[in-house]
Image (cartoon, helix red, strand yellow):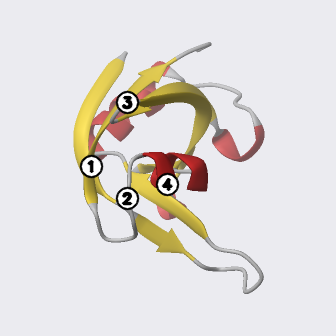
Protein backbone atom coordinates (compact mmCIF):
# COMPACT_ATOMS: atom_id res chain seq x y z
CA UNK A 1 0.00 0.00 0.00
CA UNK A 2 1.36 3.42 -1.00
CA UNK A 3 -0.19 6.69 0.16
CA UNK A 4 0.71 10.14 -1.20
CA UNK A 5 -0.67 13.17 0.64
CA UNK A 6 0.06 16.74 1.65
CA UNK A 7 0.41 17.39 5.37
CA UNK A 8 1.42 20.15 7.75
CA UNK A 9 4.26 19.53 10.19
CA UNK A 10 3.25 19.86 13.83
CA UNK A 11 5.08 19.64 17.11
CA UNK A 12 4.32 17.27 19.97
CA UNK A 13 5.86 18.66 23.11
CA UNK A 14 4.45 16.39 25.81
CA UNK A 15 7.93 16.02 27.29
CA UNK A 16 9.62 19.18 28.47
CA UNK A 17 13.15 17.94 27.73
CA UNK A 18 12.50 17.12 24.07
CA UNK A 19 10.07 17.82 21.27
CA UNK A 20 9.02 15.66 18.34
CA UNK A 21 7.81 16.74 14.91
CA UNK A 22 5.07 14.80 13.10
CA UNK A 23 2.67 14.83 10.19
CA UNK A 24 -0.73 13.17 10.42
CA UNK A 25 -1.86 10.71 7.78
CA UNK A 26 -5.32 11.20 6.26
CA UNK A 27 -8.19 9.68 8.28
CA UNK A 28 -9.53 7.44 5.48
CA UNK A 29 -6.11 5.96 4.72
CA UNK A 30 -5.44 5.51 8.45
CA UNK A 31 -8.60 3.42 8.71
CA UNK A 32 -7.50 1.34 5.72
CA UNK A 33 -4.08 0.78 7.35
CA UNK A 34 -5.84 -0.42 10.53
CA UNK A 35 -7.81 -2.95 8.47
CA UNK A 36 -4.75 -4.18 6.55
CA UNK A 37 -2.56 -4.50 9.66
CA UNK A 38 -5.18 -5.86 12.07
CA UNK A 39 -3.87 -8.22 14.72
CA UNK A 40 -0.91 -8.10 17.08
CA UNK A 41 1.42 -5.17 16.37
CA UNK A 42 4.79 -3.92 17.56
CA UNK A 43 5.12 -1.55 20.49
CA UNK A 44 2.49 1.21 20.59
CA UNK A 45 0.77 -0.34 17.53
CA UNK A 46 3.60 0.76 15.23
CA UNK A 47 3.54 -0.09 11.52
CA UNK A 48 6.81 -0.13 9.56
CA UNK A 49 6.95 2.18 6.56
CA UNK A 50 9.24 3.61 3.89
CA UNK A 51 8.77 7.38 3.61
CA UNK A 52 9.75 9.97 1.02
CA UNK A 53 9.63 13.71 1.59
CA UNK A 54 11.14 15.74 -1.23
CA UNK A 55 14.36 13.96 -2.21
CA UNK A 56 14.80 12.25 1.18
CA UNK A 57 13.72 8.63 1.71
CA UNK A 58 13.99 6.71 4.99
CA UNK A 59 12.49 3.80 6.95
CA UNK A 60 10.59 4.41 10.16
CA UNK A 61 7.27 3.54 11.77
CA UNK A 62 3.91 5.23 11.94
CA UNK A 63 1.91 5.18 15.16
CA UNK A 64 -1.83 5.29 15.88
CA UNK A 65 -2.96 8.71 17.02
CA UNK A 66 -4.56 9.15 20.40
CA UNK A 67 -8.10 7.87 20.66
CA UNK A 68 -7.81 5.81 17.48
CA UNK A 69 -7.39 8.85 15.26
CA UNK A 70 -5.15 9.21 12.23
CA UNK A 71 -1.75 7.57 12.22
CA UNK A 72 1.13 9.94 12.87
CA UNK A 73 4.54 9.93 11.23
CA UNK A 74 7.62 11.29 13.01
CA UNK A 75 9.75 13.53 10.77
CA UNK A 76 13.29 13.57 12.11
CA UNK A 77 15.47 16.65 12.29
CA UNK A 78 17.85 15.47 9.55
CA UNK A 79 14.93 15.24 7.10
CA UNK A 80 13.53 18.63 8.09
CA UNK A 81 16.98 20.18 7.64
CA UNK A 82 17.64 18.46 4.29
CA UNK A 83 14.23 19.51 2.94
CA UNK A 84 14.25 22.99 4.58
CA UNK A 85 11.05 22.29 6.53
CA UNK A 86 9.83 23.74 9.81
CA UNK A 87 6.81 23.43 12.09
CA UNK A 88 3.71 24.66 10.24
CA UNK A 89 5.12 23.99 6.75
CA UNK A 90 3.11 21.77 4.40
CA UNK A 91 4.88 19.11 2.38
CA UNK A 92 4.05 16.17 0.14
CA UNK A 93 4.62 12.83 1.85
CA UNK A 94 4.77 9.35 0.32
CA UNK A 95 4.26 6.48 2.77
CA UNK A 96 4.66 2.84 1.75
CA UNK A 97 3.76 0.07 4.18
CA UNK A 98 6.45 -2.60 4.54
CA UNK A 99 6.55 -5.87 6.52
CA UNK A 100 2.80 -6.16 7.18
Does residue 69 appear anywhere in the picture? Answer: no
Looking at the image, tell me whether mark 1 or mark 3 is earlier in sequence order. Answer: 3
The residue that appears at 43% across and 26% down in the rendered structure is 35
Pointer 4: what residue?
Answer: 81
The quarter of the displayed image where residue 1 is located: top left
Does residue 71 appear anywhere in the picture? Answer: yes
Looking at the image, tell me whether mark 1 or mark 4 is earlier in sequence order. Answer: 4
Pointer 3: what residue?
Answer: 55
Image vertical order of residue 18 relative to residue 41, above or below: below
- Is 30 or 60 nearer to us in this picture? 60
Q: Nearer the viewer, mark 1 or mark 3?
A: 3
Dots 2 and 1: beta carbons under 8 Å?
Answer: yes
Pointer 2: what residue?
Answer: 85
The quarter of the displayed image where residue 10 is located: bottom left
Q: Position of residue 80 (x, y in %)?
A: 47, 54
Looking at the image, tell me whether mark 3 or mark 4 is earlier in sequence order. Answer: 3
Distance, label 2 to label 1, CA atoms, is 8 Å
Please indicate whether residue 76 sits to the left or right of residue 41 in the image: left
The residue that appears at 65% across and 80% down in the rendered structure is 14
Q: Position of residue 9 (x, y in %)?
A: 37, 62
Looking at the image, tell me whether mark 2 or mark 1 is earlier in sequence order. Answer: 2
The residue that appears at 62% across and 13% down in the rendered structure is 99
Amino acid sequence: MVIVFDAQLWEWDARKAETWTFVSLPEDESEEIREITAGPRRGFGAVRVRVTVGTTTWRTSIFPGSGGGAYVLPVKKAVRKAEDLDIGDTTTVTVELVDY
